[in-house]
Every structure is written in C-alpha cells, then in structure tokens.
C-alpha cells in the first residue's frame, strides 16, 4: 500500500476490500460506487484534496515520520494545533455541506495520547508506546482512522456487567496469548466503512465488575467478524433515481452505520487499555471534550445554508426586504456563536502530562450545547426564507418532462434573469440540509453526536464553580464571609484558575 495523498488515491484505497455491509436489506459488494454510499466517500476524499490545495490548513509534517500527513492524524502539540483543527473543520463544512467524518479518529488519538500515558504512569503498562507505534504506522500511509465509542447500551439503567445480554456493551469475549477477541455492537458510527482502521473504546464510566468491558484497541475495518448495517437517511432513495437536482447536494453526504463485532481479533500490539476500568470515564471525558469543540464543523455547514437562504431571497427578487436582511443577520449571528465558542475552547488549550494539548472543557461543552440548538434555529429561518416550495416542489423528472416540463419552468419561475432550474436547485439544497439526507448531519447528529444535550449540561454544571461565583457576589454585596482574600481564584482551582492562567 502506497501513502495516500489525493482524494483519488483515497477512493482507490477503499477498493478491493472485503467488507460485510448491508444496506436496505441487501448485501453490498461494491460499496465504493454505490449511489447512496459514494457521496459519503466523496466528503472524506475532500479532506485529502484540501490538504493538497491548502497544505498549511489541512496537513502537517508528521513529528513521527517527517512526512506530510493529514492534520486529522496529528496529535495536538499546542493550542495553535487545536485552533488549526477548527479552522480546517469549518472550511471542510463549507466545501461539503455535510459531515466529512474524519474528526472522530483525530479526537480519539488526542484523548488516548494523554490517557494511555497516565495509565502507564499508574500501572507500569506500555500502552502509550504501543499507541505511538500504531500512530506512526497510520502516518506512514496517511490512513483514515475512525473511532468507535457509542455502545448500543441495552437497559440504560444498568451497568454493562448487569445487562441481561452481555453483548450490549463491547467486551472481551475470548483471549489468547496473541491478543483478545471482542463482541458487541457500536451504534451510528460516523464514517466507519470509509475508514481504514477503527479504534474501539468504552462509552461510559466502568466499575470493577465491568473489567472485561474496559478494552481499547485498533482493528482494521475489514477484519473478520465485523458486520456493518448502513443507517438509512432521510430521502436517501433519491440518490437511486438518477439526476442531480432532487438530491439537493449530489456530491456529498455523511455516513453512519451500526458496527457489529462477533469475536473480532485485536492483536496485543494494538491494545491500548485492557482492564483498567478506572480510566474509562477519564478517556470518555477527554474524547468528548475534544469532539465537542470539533462541532465547529457545523458552522461551516451553516455558512452553506445561510448562503442558500441568501441566494433564494435574491432569486425571489426580495434581497432588500428588511425582515429578510434581518433574518440573514440572525442566522449569521447564531452560526458565529458556534464557531466562537469552539475556537475559543481551542485557544484556551493547555498542556497535559503526556505533552499533548487539551482544549478548554467548559467552552468545548458550551460549543456543543449550542450545536444541539442553533442549527435548528438556523434551519427554521432557512425554511422561512425558502418558503413552502422547500417541501412541496415538483421533481426533476417533472421539470424535464416533455409535456409538463414547460409548465413547471413557467410557474416555478422567480426573477426573470434566474432560471427555474437554478431556483429549484437552491430550494432542494435547503431541503437537503434541513429535512433531507444532510439534515442527518446538520440537525440530528448536532443533537446527539459527541453526547446528547444533557451530557453537556452535566459537564457544564460540574465546571460552573458556583460556590466561587456566590462568593464573588457576596463580597461585592458587602456580605461578611469567613475569608475575604483578594485572590480567591487560586484557592478555587478549576475552570477560572485556568482561564486566569493561575495554574495550567
Ligand atoms: Fe467531524 Fe462534524 Fe462529522 Fe463529527 S459531525 S465527524 S465533528 S464533521
Ligand atoms: Fe459525530
């Protein structure tokens, strides 16, 4: 296998692999050219092409191999690295209008860098060095590495070991002196089929009885024993109809699949945690910190939707109407709020014991919490500006029909100098992003990816430092409190201490 450089190299690297994939009840052999799957491959291919077109933005020189590699494979060595990840994510959101699927692996490597280091520190294991060797191998070929975290969970009120069916969380099912075998399933795994390797990680806090669930390891995506059941997406049948208008965004789409592991082998050199259950919650927390600010990707996607709303206003002949201008400003304000919190989390990054940089956990959670809401508000405004045609418009086949086509062209016309077809294309793009295939990424994934809203609220409440804030208020209100030291930040620790650089 040669090092992958261009999008085309990447697409070719996916060919001739034997994956067990099911889509709409059928086994898919040539998934690379499947019309429903290909747009998701194109979105990932764009991460390679951007690295060629704008190397400073989307690539780095690997500190492990000295070769140029994708920024998605680079562990953050500075706050600036974290910031550049966000800038690259926004750009890719703009170029694809969808989820380009590559951030999960990036955030997994970042989180594992510090976690494996700290496990080794406590238990004298050698996970960190194995992780670095694996990462070096990934750099050599410039591979796509996916991260698989979300277990199917069964009864949400029970821990893994207490589940009636022990496969509700991925676990070690067998052992040999060469490695372990895992069984279980991961739900809605972004870009899993489009990856070369997958890092499997636990999804929740674990206790001693859950030891066999405390497994982290890397497996090739085409390993024996893995079945992929492709998640269908809203309006996905349109990609099978031919034509390129009704799909809304013909080139790009996201990808989620259920991944089922049945005694899948992980070799010893690819195991990065095995039984250290006390580090599971730390890993999950670190991974979600990184991933929650990665959701600035949605500000790039939002740029496309705002552009579509502005374009349809032009095509309808009403770009100067004050309420329309105001709605576009509101959409922009909401969208930049996502970007602002995400990139601020990266700017406030700080060094971990292993030498990698962690983004600010409070702002990362605030970013993702905005993402669970603001794309819905932006979508509402886009549909408002698009009008009812977003959901009721005749099809591409009607537009091109020998008899009724001229009626569609005549009665769906907006401004005289805009073709009906172009107007339909923009309306379909708004539909695609707010109701159709890419609404999966822009809306529902925004809600649940990297944790549902309540998960961020829990983290925000943990970091809110309420006692510190009450104390600030009481001091200014003249209320006598036991100690009235000037610098109370230092003794409080936590978020504000980091903000004010009292501690790292
Ligand atoms: Fe990356 Fe965004 Fe897709 Fe997550 S949703 S993988 S952060 S593009
Ligand atoms: Fe995601």
Image (cartoon, rainbow, N blue to C red):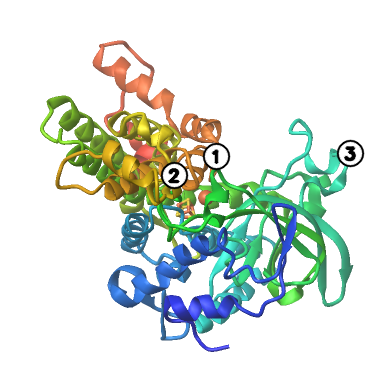
- N-terminal label among 2 and 1: 2
Marks 2 and 1: which is nearer the front?
2
Judging by the rendered image, the residue that carries numbered circle 3 is 164
Asked if one can make out residue 239 in the rendered structure from this viewpoint, the answer is yes
Q: Residue furthest bottom?
A: 2
- Residue sitting nearer the eye, 130 or 475: 130
Judging by the rendered image, the residue that carries numbered circle 2 is 395
Q: Point out residue 301 in the picture as x, y percentages from the top left corner.
A: 36, 49
Judging by the rendered image, the residue that carries numbered circle 1 is 448
- Residue sitting nearer the eye, 61 or 119: 61
Q: Pointers 3 and 2 in contact (CB under 8 A)?
A: no
Q: Point out residue 198 in the picture as x, y percentages from the top left corner.
A: 63, 65
Quadrant of the image containing the N terminus: bottom right
Marks 3 and 1: which is nearer the front?
1
Element at badge 3? loop
Asked if one can make out residue 502 in the rendered structure from this viewpoint, the answer is no
- N-terminal label among 3 and 2: 3
- N-terminal label among 3 and 1: 3
Q: Point out residue 296 in the picture as x, y percentages from the top left corner.
A: 37, 49
Q: Point out residue 471 in the picture as x, y percentages from the top left corner.
A: 35, 21
């Amino acid at each position: 296998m040669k090092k992958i450089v261009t999008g085309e190299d990447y697409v070719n690297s996916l060919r001739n692999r034997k994956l067990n994939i099911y889509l709409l009840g059928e086994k898919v052999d040539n998934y690379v050219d499947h019309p429903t799957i290909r747009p998701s491959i194109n979105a990932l291919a764009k991460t390679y092409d951007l690295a060629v077109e704008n190397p400073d933005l989307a690539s780095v020189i690997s500190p492990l191999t000295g070769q140029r590699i994708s920024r998605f494979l680079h562990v953050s060595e500075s706050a600036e690295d974290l910031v550049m990840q966000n800038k690259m994510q926004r750009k890719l959101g703009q170029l694809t209008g969808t989820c380009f699927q590559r951030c999960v692996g990036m955030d997994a490597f970042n989180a594992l860098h510090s976690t494996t280091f700290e496990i080794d520190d406590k238990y004298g294991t050698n996970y960190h060095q194995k992780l670095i060797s694996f990462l070096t191998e990934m750099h050599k070929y410039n591979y796509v590495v996916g991260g698989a975290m979300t277990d199917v969970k069964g009864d949400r009120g029970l821990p893994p070991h207490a589940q009636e069916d022990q496969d509700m969380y991925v676990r070690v099912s067998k052992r040999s002196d060469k490695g372990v075998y895992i069984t279980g399933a991961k739900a809605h795994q972004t870009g899993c089929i489009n990856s070369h390797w997958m890092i499997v990680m636990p999804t929740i806090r674990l206790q001693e009885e859950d030891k066999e669930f405390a497994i982290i390891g890397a497996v090739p995506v085409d390993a024996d024993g893995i079945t992929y059941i492709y998640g269908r997406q809203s309006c996905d049948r349109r990609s099978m109809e031919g034509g390129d208008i009704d799909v809304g965004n013909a080139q790009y789409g996201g990808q989620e699949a259920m991944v089922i592991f049945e005694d899948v082998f992980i070799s010893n050199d690819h195991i990065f945690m095995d039984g250290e259950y006390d580090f599971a919650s730390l890993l999950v927390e670190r991974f979600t910190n990184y991933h929650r600010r990665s959701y600035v990707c949605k500000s790039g996607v939002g740029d496309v939707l705002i552009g579509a709303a502005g374009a349809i206003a032009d095509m309808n002949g009403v770009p100067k109407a004050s309420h329309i201008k105001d709605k576009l400003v509101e959409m922009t304000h909401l969208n930049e709020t996502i970007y602002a919190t995400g990139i601020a989390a990266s700017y406030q990054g700080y060094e971990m014991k292993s030498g990698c940089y962690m983004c600010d956990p409070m702002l990362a959670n605030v970013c993702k919490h905005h993402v669970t809401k603001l794309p819905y508000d932006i979508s509402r405004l886009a549909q408002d500006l698009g009008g009812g045609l977003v959901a009721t418009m005749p099809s591409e086949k009607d537009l091109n029909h020998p008899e009724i086509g001229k009626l569609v062209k005549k009665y769906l016309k907006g401004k005289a100098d805009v073709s009906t077809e172009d107007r339909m294309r923009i309306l379909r793009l708004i539909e695609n992003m707010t109701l159709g295939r890419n609404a999966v990424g822009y809306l529902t994934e925004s809600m649940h990816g990297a944790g549902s809203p309540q998960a961020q609220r829990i983290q925000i409440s943990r970091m809110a430092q309420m006692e510190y804030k009450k104390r600030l208020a009481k001091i200014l209100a003249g209320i006598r409190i036991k100690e009235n030291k000037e610098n109370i930040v230092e003794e409080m620790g936590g978020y504000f201490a980091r903000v004010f650089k009292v501690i790292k």
